[in-house]
Image: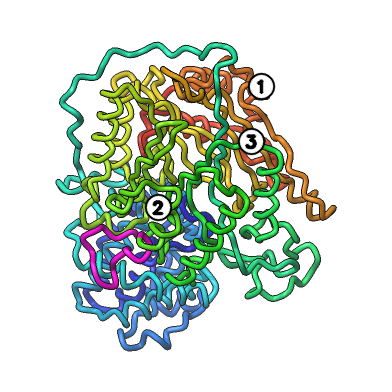
Amino acid sequence: MICLQGSVTSWTLSFFLLYLSISANSGTYLLQSVFTEYQSSFPMIEKAASQKKNEDQYMQETAKPDTSQTSNLGGGAFFTNILSHVFSLLNIKEVMDSIKLGKTSPAACFVCKFGVSMLHHLMAQGRSSEELSTLALSICKTLKLESERVCYGVVEIFKDDMLYVFQNTDLSPHEVCGVMLGYTCSPVHHIDHNWTLPLTPKTKPPLKSKVMPKPLAPVVHVLHLSDSHFDPYYKEGSNAECGEPLCCRITNEPASHPSKAAGKWGDYRNCDMPLRTLESMLKHVTDNHKIDYVIWTGDIPPHDIWKSTQSEQIYILRSVTQLMRKYLKKVPIFPALGNHESAPVDSFPLPEQSGHHSISWLYDELAKLWSPWLPKDARNTIEKFTIRPKNPLSKTTLIYPKVSILKEWWLLLNSTDPAEELQWLIQELQTAELQGEKVHIIGHIPPGSGNCIQVWSHNYYRIINRFENTVVAQFFGHTHNDEFEVFYDEKTLDRPTNIAYIGPSVTTYGGGNPAYRIYTVDGNYPRSSRAVLDHETYYLNITEVNLTDRPMWEKMYSAKQAFRMKALFPSDWDDLIQRFEVNDALFQKFYRYFNKLSDFYNKPCVGACKAEILCNLRSGRSHDPALCKRTI
C-alpha cells in the first residue's frame, strides 16, 4: 500500500533481530532446519552452504564482520558470514524494497519466515532488549542496509513496540508472515486473523442503473491533496544522493558536484517537499480555481522515519494545518490520517493500549487542530478515525483504514476489525442506504494495495459490494502515483461495481513531479447522483522550475478528454483497462500520467511492468491474484 518507499521500516527490524543467535548451539540446529525447509525453493542457498566446507576456507573469501558489540553472545563467526553470503545472493536490499512495497515473492517470504523464526528463538532464550538491540544494529551495519545513523535510529525508535507485540502475540512465525505478506506466503488459520465480518441483515436492494446528470445540472469542484511529505529541513544545494532514505536536508553535507545538488524547488531523488513549493501550489490553487471543498488524504510528515518523534510529528502537523488555513481560508477541508503521521511511523496501537504505548497523543492533537473541519462528536470516533463530516455539498463518510497497514505491528495481536472500524462503516452505510443518501469514502492506503492487510481488505471489499448503490466513489493516496482501482462483483469478478481514485502525491519522493487533482462532482440538488463527472490533474515540472526559478503549474490532463471516456462510472474505467491491453500507445500515455510527466521516468512500461500495472488497476482487493486473470 509502498507504504514507505525507499526507507527502512519497522518490518526490517524483525529481520535484524535474527542475527548472531546462531552462535548458540541450538541456533545452529534452527538454522539448519530453516535451510532444509527452503533449500528446494532457493537452490542458491543450498549452493552457498555446500561451497563452504569449513570456516577457514570461507573466511578467506569473505571479510570478517565487526563482532565487537556481540561478543557477549559467544562465537559463531562462520554462521555469521554464511548468513551475510546467503543474503547477498538473495539481494537482501532488493527483497526489503519489495516488502516495503507490499510485494510478495518467494525470497521475501523466506526472509520473513526465517527472520521471525530466529526472533522467536532469541526471545525464547531470554535475550534482553539491550542484547536484541545490539544484534539489530550489528546486522544493519554489517549488511550495509543503511547508514550507521539510520540503523541506530530505526532500532531505537521501533524496538519497544515491536518487542512488546512479539512477546504478546500467539501467532506462529509462518502465520506472522501470512498476516503481513498475504496468504500466498503462508495460510493463516488463527481465528483472530481469519475472520469474516457479518454484513447487515437487510437484503441488498436491486441494482440501480447509472445515468449521467442532465445538462447544466449543478456541479461542485473538489480539490484532492495527498502525500505532501513537507520537509522543514530541506536545503537547496545539499546532497541529493546521500545514500539514506531521505536526502536534500541540512543534515546532509553539501553536494560534491552540481549534478548531485538538491534543487531549489524540489528533487526527483529521495527528497521531500520544501516549504516554498508547498506554498506555491496552495497559492496557485486559490488564485486559479474555485474550490467547494477539499479532501486531504494524509502523509504530511517527511520520510525521516529513523528520527521521527511525537513532538516532531506534532510540529509538522501544526505547521501544514496552519498553511492550509492561510491559503484555503474557509473552504471546508476533510482530512484523513496517513501512515506517516504516527511516531514510530506505521504504529497505531489499538484503543485498549495505554501508557507509553497509547496513541492518544496524536488523536488528541488532531482533534484540536482539525476541529474547525470536523463535527462536534468527532472526538467519540477519532481513535478509529472514522468520521461522518458535516458537508452540505456532499454526504461524505471519512474512513481512515489505519488498521489495514501491512507493517502495523499491533495487528499481530488481533486483526479482527480493530476498533470496530468496519462494523461502524457498515452501520453508517446502512443508515445512508435507508435514507437514500450517496457516500464518498476517503482514506489513505488503497484497499487493493499490497500494503493493506489481506483479511481487512477482503472484508472491506465485501462491504463495498453490498452497498454499491450507496458508495459512489472512494478516494485514497499513499502510492504517490496517479492511478485508480476498479472493484468487481464478488461472485464473478467480472462486473465492475465501484471505483477508487488514487490521487497523485504533492511530494517528489519516488521520482514524480508535484501534483494535485480536482474532481468535478454532480452537485447539490434533489436526487443528485454525487458521481464524479471528470477529474483534472495539475503538476509542476521540477526540472524546468529548478532551471528557471519561475514556478508554472500546468494542467496535465482531463480524464475524459485524455482517454476519450463518455463517463467515469466503474464500467467506463473497466473499459479503459481493456483498451489499455490492446492499445499500447494509450497505455503508455497513461503511464506518463501515472508518473506525473516526470523527467525521471523516460522509458516505456512493457512486459512485466505493464502486466503489473494492469493487474493493480483491477485489484481493489489486496493479495488476490484471481483479480488479474483477465490481464495479459
Image quadrant assignment for residue 200: top left
Which of the two residues, 233 or 6, is positioned nearer the viewer here? 233
Answer with mark 2 or mark 1, whichever residue precedes in sequence. 2
Residue at screen point 51% across, 23% down:
522
Amino acid at pointer 1: Gln
Q: Is residue 604 visible?
A: yes
The residue to which callout 1 is attached is 561
Which of the two residues, 598 or 473, is positioned nearer the viewer here? 473
Image quadrant assignment for residue 82: bottom left
Which of the two residues, 62 or 360, is positioned nearer the viewer here? 360
Q: Residue 289 in the image: x percent, y percent? A: 66, 37
Q: Is residue 616 left or right of residue 166?
A: right
The residue stretch that appears in magenta? 348-363
Amino acid at pointer 2: Ala
Q: Residue 295 in the image: x percent, y percent? A: 50, 42
The residue to which callout 2 is attached is 108
Q: Report how far apart the C-alphas of labels 1 and 3 lie in the structure.
A: 21 Å
Q: Is residue 46 visible?
A: no
> Which callout, 2 or 1, points to the residue nearer the camera?
1
Residue 306 higher or lower than 382, as above or below: below
Which of the two residues, 328 or 630, is positioned nearer the viewer here? 328
